[in-house]
Amino acid sequence: MNYEEINELLDQAFAQTRIHYNFKESERIFAIVLENISSSENLPGLGELQAQALVGMGAALYRQNRADEAFDYFTSGLLAAKESKSRDTEAKAYAGFGQFYGSRNEFLLSIENTNRAIAIYEELGDQGGIARNLSNIGKVYASISDYHRALECTTRALTILEATDDIMSTVITMQSLSGLYSLLNLYDKALEYALNALALCEKHNVNSNLQSGIIGNIGVSYYYLGKYDKAMEFYSRALALSIDLGLKGQIAQNTVNIGLVYKDTGLYDNALEYYGKALALHEDSGTMNSSSFILGSIGELYADKKYEGYDPVKGEEYLLKSIAQSQDFGRRKYTYRFCLFLSDLYKSENRWEEAYHYKSKHHEIKDEVQNEELIQQAQNYDIDRALSNERAEADATKRLLHKTLPQSIADRVIKGETHIADYFESASVLFADVVGFTKISSKMPPAAVLGFMNFIFEHFDSIAAKYGCERIKTIGDGYMAVCGAPITYPDHCERLARMALEMMEDIKLPEDIRKHLPDGTLFHLRIGLHCGEITAGLIGTGKLAYDIYGDAVNIASRMESHGEPGKIHVSDEFMNTLVVGNDLELSLPSTMTSMSPMSPISPISPMSLQFTERGEIEIKGKGMMRTYFLEQV
């Protein structure tokens, strides 16, 4: 099977997952893809396809509630994505981890991995990816009852998605918002989002499985708004659709919901009929452990004296079964609700001791649930605090890296690069030295020396930024900069020449520095410039530094050390590169003028440059070299 055939199979598998919600079928196709990839050799691009298939298989298994198997595929997929440098697939793997950890109630890990996915999607400019993962974070916050943050994340996600053509994700996010507003008992808002989601589904013929859930949610909103006719209409539609699709869980839920409408409208026999159907569905599917609400509702019905079929024995039987099944925290609200109904039933039958027991049990379990909710809120606070601390630490690290490294290099470090070594065919290097400062500074207070150097180097840094140059390091009163690395510029010679000329201009020192200098003190810069090939990269593991290496660096240093105070000493190669780069020819052997075009980032008008030939001098390690002094005329 060739690359195109494997890629086509992948598209089919993803369509089964994203469009048809047929996760079993997508699992089957992904397995075929992985088998074909393992038996294929030397086909370019297979590594990326393998990464996509592994992560896709993880997603298909996760949606079938096979989270442990999914985790293994996400892990293998992440490694394959990193190896093949497939950033999009890497993001999908992190998103998968986010969902996995969320299902395990490991909320910090869930949010951490989902944020990693978002960071990659931001790097790629993938708005849909950002939005889908924001929505996933919203679900995590909802699961820990932090509805404010859940709404914030999910609303942001919807705002982004509505500007894209990702209809499926838009519908799912609208459905999530509808569910959040239901949890907050804001059923008008819940209904609004659910109706909008359904309208989108019908307009774009979106997956029927999704429509079934949305229609059921609309029925829920109408039910709690007291609009029973509309609730029955949408519950019935949802039931019919879920039966057609064979969605057993939704069939049972819609059947119960119809029973609740009948109960609240006084049609008790109809309610009992639908409760019974729902209970039978749970028995058939082997999920009786999740039927406590239905059992309690049946018991409540039999215990209601308004019902013609009032039967306290059956009422007691079903209520006791419900209470026995409602043991975990997720269903214990049913427990104390049905304990109260059972207490009332015993009271009506003059069974006072049992009535008192279950009334006490009602209060006991209710208090336990409320205490557990308070504990959960405290844990949520700890999670929020931990997340805030992590964000603060990440921001602090980012600020520090941007202060100590070039921004483009810092960004690469933040994204996980640890071994950075780049080659630049042509860049310009500057060395500068404050002549005579060492002698004078020996008579100055240490704070004044430090203040002077900080002031001077910050001034030089601002000039460097103006022309797109990068300060590499300072050594004592020496200053080193480069242009053309880590960001390449075709006019790096001109930019660095402009920087050097502006550095030579008079600097007005502040009074708190000047007062420590002897009267009449003059400072001169000595600057050297050269250009050529260099290697630039990150050195260190604990303390990171960006540095440049190569012959061009050594020669630039020699230009400075062999120069003269108040002058810019440049190599023959630098002068020729600058002049030729501006399409000019040398007209004189000793002096020439070049009219440089305006630099794209420089506010200075076109300048006239004069090069005064110094003649040939011996440069240590290089022999005789022709050099020049550069000045502006």
Image (cartoon, helix red, strand yellow):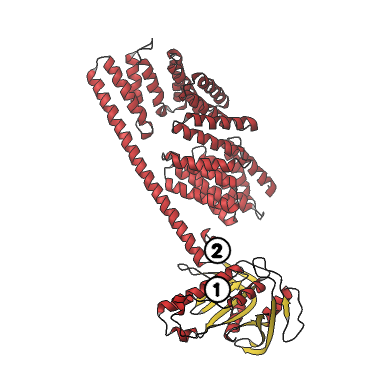
Residue at image point 51% right, 51% down: 116
Q: Residues within 10 Å of mark 2 (few under 14, many from 20)?
A: some
Residue at image point 55% right, 69% down: 462
Whole-number angstrom distance, CA of label 1 to CA of label 2: 17 Å
Q: Tell me: residue 582, above or below residue 519.
A: above
For mark 2, what is the residue? 407
For mark 1, what is the residue? 460
Per the image, label 2 sits on a secondary structure element best described as helix
Residue at image point 54% right, 42% down: 157
Q: Tell me: residue 594, above or below residue 392.
A: below
Q: Position of residue 239 (x, y in %)?
A: 53, 23
- Please give left or right for residue 297 compared with residue 82 in the image: left
Q: Are marks 1 and 2 in contact (CB under 8 Å)?
A: no
Residue at image point 47% right, 23% down: 223
The answer to whether residue 107 shows anywhere in this view is yes
Amino acid under disc 2 = Gln
Q: How many marks?
A: 2
Per the image, label 1 sits on a secondary structure element best described as helix
Dividing the picture into quarters, in which one does residue 537 lie? bottom right
Q: Tell me: residue 362, above or below residue 565.
A: above
Q: Position of residue 485 (x, y in %)?
A: 61, 69
